Image (cartoon, rainbow, N blue to C red):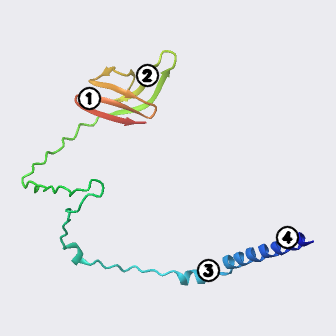
């Protein structure tokens, strides 16, 4: 009798707790939710922070070695730095159409369209000074002169 009474009391308690949870979730209206949102679109930046110079003090003892850190001075950057212009490689008219693989012989042929003509190339073959270096299901790597081109499907 005692166990049944405790069971019924616990069931009622669980129903009350879940009822309170659902009441809290569903009792808020959309207007209350909108009123709780605060939108601040105006931001100001304190420019005095940007002009401040900071220095690091590195003269503390190392917690692992028990000795002071060595201070390294960084050299100032050189003023006359020459920037080399990248030479844009000439584009090639190539399109990767697909791949044919033979699992028994472990060979791969790539179907490539070069300048409007279609070719079957295996890795290492050269046509019109363009060499096929690598072939996967999604892309190929071609080399013309010293320039490598990656062409996706």
User: In the rendered image, which quarter contains the N terminus?
Assistant: bottom right
Find the residue positioned furthest to the right: 1
In the rendered image, which residue does mark 1 sit on? 144
Q: Secondary structure at mark 3?
A: helix
Between the C-alphas of marks 1 and 4, the distance is: 82 Å
In the rendered image, which residue does mark 4 sit on? 7
Q: Are marks 1 and 4 in contact (CB under 8 Å)?
A: no
Find the residue positioned furthest to the top: 105
Q: Earlier in the sequence, mark 4 or mark 3?
A: 4
Q: Quadrant of residue 145?
A: top left
Residue sitting at x 41%, y 32%: 96
Q: Nearer the viewer, mark 4 or mark 2?
A: 4
Mark 2: few, some, or many residues within 10 Å (few <14, many ≥20)?
some
The disc label shown at residue 109, or none: 2
Q: Nearer the viewer, mark 4 or mark 3?
A: 4
Between the C-alphas of marks 4 and 2, the distance is: 74 Å
Q: Is residue 122 left or right of residue 147?
A: right
Between the C-alphas of marks 1 and 2, the distance is: 19 Å
Residue 50 x %, y %: 22, 72
């Amino acid at each position: 009798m005692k166990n049944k009474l405790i069971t019924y009391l616990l069931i009622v308690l669980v129903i009350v707790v879940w009822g309170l949870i659902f009441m809290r979730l569903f009792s808020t209206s959309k207007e209350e939710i909108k009123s709780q949102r605060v939108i601040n679109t105006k931001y100001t930046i304190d420019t005095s922070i940007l002009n401040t110079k900071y220095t690091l003090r590195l003269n503390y003892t190392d917690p692992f070695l028990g000795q002071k850190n060595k201070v390294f001075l960084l050299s100032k950057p050189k003023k006359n730095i020459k920037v080399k212009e990248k030479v844009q490689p000439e584009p090639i008219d190539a399109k990767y159409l697909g791949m044919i693989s033979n699992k028994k012989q472990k060979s791969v042929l790539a179907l490539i369209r070069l300048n409007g003509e279609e070719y079957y190339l295996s890795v290492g073959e050269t046509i019109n000074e363009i060499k096929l270096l690598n072939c996967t299901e999604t892309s190929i790597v071609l080399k013309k002169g010293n320039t490598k081109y990656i062409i996706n499907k």
